[in-house]
Amino acid sequence: MIEVETVRGDAFACNVYRVGDALVDAGDDAERLPPADEIDAVYLTHAHADHAAALAEYDVPVYVHPAESDAEPLSERDVRELRDGDEVTMDGVTFEVLHTPGHSTGSVCYWSPDERVVFSGDLVFDNGAPGRADTPDGDPDALRESLERLASLDAEHAYPGHREPFGDIAEKTRIAVNLV
Ligand SMILES: [Zn+2]
């Protein structure tokens, strides 16, 4: 069973998850992150500042979808691009990269069919609220499609970018689709 540690999960900042030597997202405060020499890579769900600003002081390879590899928080970082269908390994567990735009153009999820775990970024939260799509890089139609894709995964545990991890993903997603 995969071990996921929430490095930080208060209501305002983004959640940072540690899986072995990897982080999913980085938040906006480098002081709260594990020392960089304990971490091999950061896998971003997207490059909005609340998820990525801490990288300015955190010198490890950063994985992100090409649509956001030029985002400001990643300037001068060691950026590696990830596309839909790519696979990454965290703590020995294989995750599929799913391009799930809508909240932002380059949003991705990291999905492990073996563990039935998904790092879902800002697609949907534990209360069924969808991620915002009314931002300059948001797209409500794309968000609805991405939510349908998340619902089709048969995932058991979702680790979102904000609020609490949750189950009942198909149900939460169904609520969210109607609220986009
Ligand atoms: Zn965001």
Image: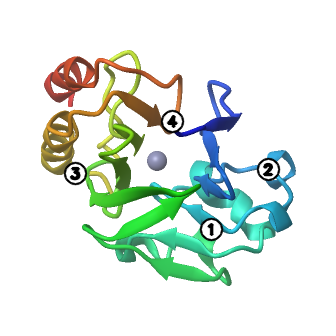
Measured in 3D between alpha carbons, the distance from the residue under mark 2 to the one under mark 4, in whole angstroms, is 24 Å
Determine the CA span between mark 1 and mark 4.
33 Å
Marks 2 and 3: in contact by CB < 8 Å? no
Q: Is residue 38 left or right of residue 66?
A: right
Looking at the rendered image, the quarter that the C terminus falls into is top left
> With respect to residue 119, does 99 lie above or below?
below
- Number of the front mark, 4 or 3: 4
Numbered disc 2: secondary structure: loop
Amino acid bearing label 1? Pro
Q: Badge 1 is on which residue?
A: 73
Residue 121 visible in the current orientation = no
Q: How many marks?
A: 4
Residue 33 badge: 2
Which residue type carries mark 4? Met
Q: CA distance from mark 3 to mark 1?
A: 22 Å
Colouring method of the image: rainbow
Q: Nearer the viewer, residue 155 or 24?
A: 155
The secondary structure type at the circle numbered 1 is helix
Mark 2 or mark 4: whose residue is earlier in sequence:
4
Task: Identify the mark at residue 59; answer none if there is no mark.
Answer: none
Residue labelled with disc 4: 1
Above or below: residue 155 compared with residue 105: above
Q: Are marks 1 and 4 in contact (CB under 8 Å)?
A: no
Could you tell me which residue is drawn at 59 percent across and 71 percent down? 62
Amino acid type of the residue that numbered disc 3 sits on in the rendered structure: Asp
